[in-house]
Image: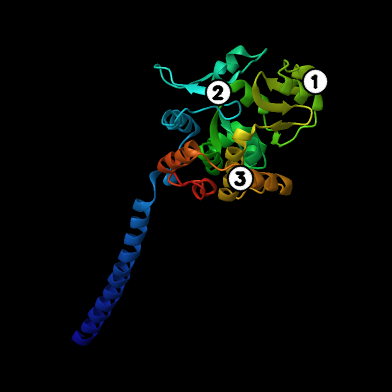
Amino acid sequence: MKTQITLINTRLNQNSQKYYMKKLLLIPLLTLLCSCSVNTPKAELQHKSFREAKLNMVEIFREMDNPRTLYCGCNIKFPKRGGYMPDPESCGYHSDRYAKNAKRIEAEHIMPAWEFGHKRRCWVKGHRRNCEHNDAEFQAMHADLHNLYPAIGEVNSDRNNYSFTDSLSDDNYHKDFISGKKVRNHSRHKVRGYGQCEMVIDRSKEEAMPPVRARGIIARAYLYMSSRYNIELEKDKKHLFQKWDKMYAPDKNECLRNSRVRQIQGHDNPFVSRQCHY
């Protein structure tokens, strides 16, 4: 009887040892996982909301040297009450329509939310608002500062989801623009201009031709979004953005913006970083 009890105790001890050995082996693995979580930037763990991103934009552009709006290149002012606003006179901006919309800055999604969202299940079920509340990846794309840039509200609205191009075939418009004549009303001729602002939007073709100044920024935002979120670009569109990326290198402000976004989000836009030498 004593022999049986001893044998049982021995087996119990062996099983206990195996159990605790397994627990001990898990400790290094758990430690590694914890250390990885600690070293991961907070912004990578929990992405900023679109509202937070817009607030961050104000502070980022406040640090820049003579910051300007994306499409029209208007100076950006920072009133004491907070936020920012465009200075239309600094770029010859003129509008016959939305005076209120023309006097405010909006956060422009360079790659529109429709472009990266309309095929997602959340969009099919409830469009953009549903995605903002129920799709974590969409929320990350929607609030990604590398794809956001200040633009005059009216231009942001007019640009809509239109594709970018480097040529529009309305020769008469360009003759008027070059000669300094008043830009024709887009509701009749379907071409939209904004005084001396060089942004051109053609509603009939659903295309927008940005000024040379903005093309590099636009290209690198599109290439970044495509790469980071696995968004396939049409062949012609990708070729256009690769061409703009090579032709129009980032300036000091674009490099500074990229650096500040990296500090906030935890990652940079490599299409900008590899060309920055400031």
Q: Position of residue 172 (x, y in %)?
A: 81, 23
Sequence-earlier tag: 1 or 3: 1
Q: Is residue 121 left or right of residue 3?
A: right
- Specify the quadrant that holds the N terminus: bottom left
Residue type indicated by callout 3: Asp
**Contact check, label 1 and label 3, Cβ < 8 Å:** no
Q: Which residue is mark 1?
A: 189
**View extreme (front): residue:** 179
Q: Which residue is mark 2?
A: 74
Q: Which residue is mark 3?
A: 245
Q: Position of residue 63 (x, y in %)?
A: 41, 31
Sequence-earlier tag: 3 or 2: 2
Q: Mark 1 and mark 2: span between their CA atoms? A: 25 Å
Sequence-earlier tag: 1 or 2: 2
Q: Which class describes the residues within 10 Å of circle 1: few (<14), some (14-19), or many (20+)?
A: few
Can you tell which of label 1 and label 3 is closer to the viewer?
A: 3
Q: Secondary structure at mark 1?
A: helix
